[in-house]
Image: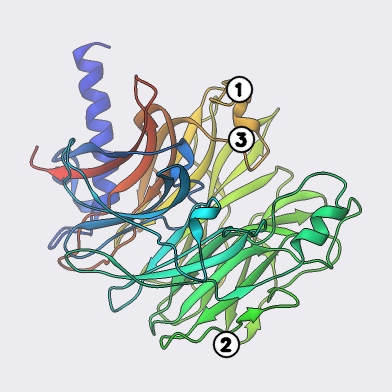
Amino acid sequence: MSPRVRRTATLAAMAVLAACVTGWAQNEEPVARAAPVRAACAFRTATLMPVADTKAIGYANNTRALIDSTGVVSIAVRSKHGSQFTIGLVRAAVAWKDGEEPAVTWIEDRDSLPFSGAPQRVAAIAAAPDGTIHMAWYGGVRGETDHEVHYAHFTTGKSARIAEEQAPFRVPGFESVAAAASKPMELWQEHAAIAVGPDGTVHLAWEARDAYRRASDGLPRPGIAYATRSPNGAWSVNAVLDRPPYLQVDDKSGQSRPSILVDRTGLVHVLCYGAVGGVQQILYGTTAGRGFSGWKPVAPSSGDQRHAAGALDAQGRLHVAWREGVGQGGSAIMYSVRDADGHWRSPARLSPAGENASTPSVGVTDSGVCIAWVAWDPGAKNSDGEVDNGFPADNSTVEGRVEITSSPLAREQFEPPTVTDRGPASYPCWAIGPSGPGAVRPPIVWTSVDAGGVVNLKLGWCERGK
């Protein structure tokens, strides 16, 4: 690459990252009026810690990272602690330096929850108005073969401390269903998503199954279940459940991998994907109090849609990106906005033609929207030997290069995407934090494989004046 081309690419990267952070530092102007800011932002990266595999924070359709008003980043990580896969809360500060060691608080064994006896899966986290961090994930416990939803919350300050761990409810029946299934199964209660409302209520959604809703092959059909935890710790459902608290299910189709968000009015927004006319589509619904709106497709298409991620802006608009099948076996990142009046705008393709892409993450500032994803050349194989990352399968490892684009909220014009890690890299996720005067710029986290084959948790941020 010539020096002139290299400089052009560097300036393009600065422009994209500057657009993503404008509005998060005090006295900044909106992107449309801030051309000097674009050239003054350099993208910096640091290695936080080695992790066991590239799925340490995947999939990133839910919040895996937070940033507080002091610039401390909290990341929910799944990795090996000792010889067992478990969950840790990683804490580091922007700007981080390679070689420093972040603080990690690992989930602990409790009398009723001996986690070290069974692997745990990726967690989602959310911050409450009082600064506590709430976490939800799924996994087993010693002596139990099924996956159940687990919950923890952390107090924060100079360090994070586990204040509570529990399995608030349990859905029995896994062993009988697995024994009767026509092929081996391990899925049960999966893919927990979590958000905290303005009143401190915790909202939990997950991919649930039970012993009664089954397909013709005997496998249980998944559906999205929903529960809440009040600020004083009372769950809407608890103990042993005959049936998960589904939002809306039928006997013919299922829904998978939810994302959940709560706006400033307390309205709960839920995204997932499910079959519509035999094709997987992104579905959306809202709940307030005890009522659910029902599922409706976001952007009906003949292409297979999965891996939806969303973020809310200050005006109550919901920004959603997802992976959609296009052409002959290809996949692209699509994007749409739900306006405050409930109208969905026509979807737009963000990833360029000629590349495949998946697992997007969405971040919103006071003045811009940022989308990151993993991209690869058609026909590329991941570390598991799967062509095109196993598309359209949703459990395959997704590896490639991390790309980012952004747009001002006011004009909806996305920059050409910029590569921030050429890979093999996986599952970028924007850190969610406070907005408004004095707020901290949002960093991004992802996993990346170095030249020696070590998988590392990476942190990227925009640094001014460099």
The kind of residue on which mark 3 rests is Ser
Sequence order check, earlier mark of 2 and 3 = 2
Residue 238, by quadrant, is bottom right
**According to the image, label 3 marks what residue?**
331
Circle 1 residue: 385
User: x%, y% of residue 116?
Assistant: 49, 54
Q: Which label number is shown at residue 289? A: 2
Q: Is residue 320 visible?
A: no
Alpha carbon of mark 1 to alpha carbon of mark 3: how far? 18 Å
- Give the quarter of the figure containing the N terminus: top left
Q: Residues within 10 Å of mark 3 (few under 14, many from 20)?
A: many
Mark 1 element type: loop
**In the visual, does 144 lie left or right of 349?**
right
Q: CA distance from mark 2 to mark 3?
A: 37 Å
**Residue at position x 43%, y 72% from top?**
316
Q: Quadrant of residue 79?
A: top left
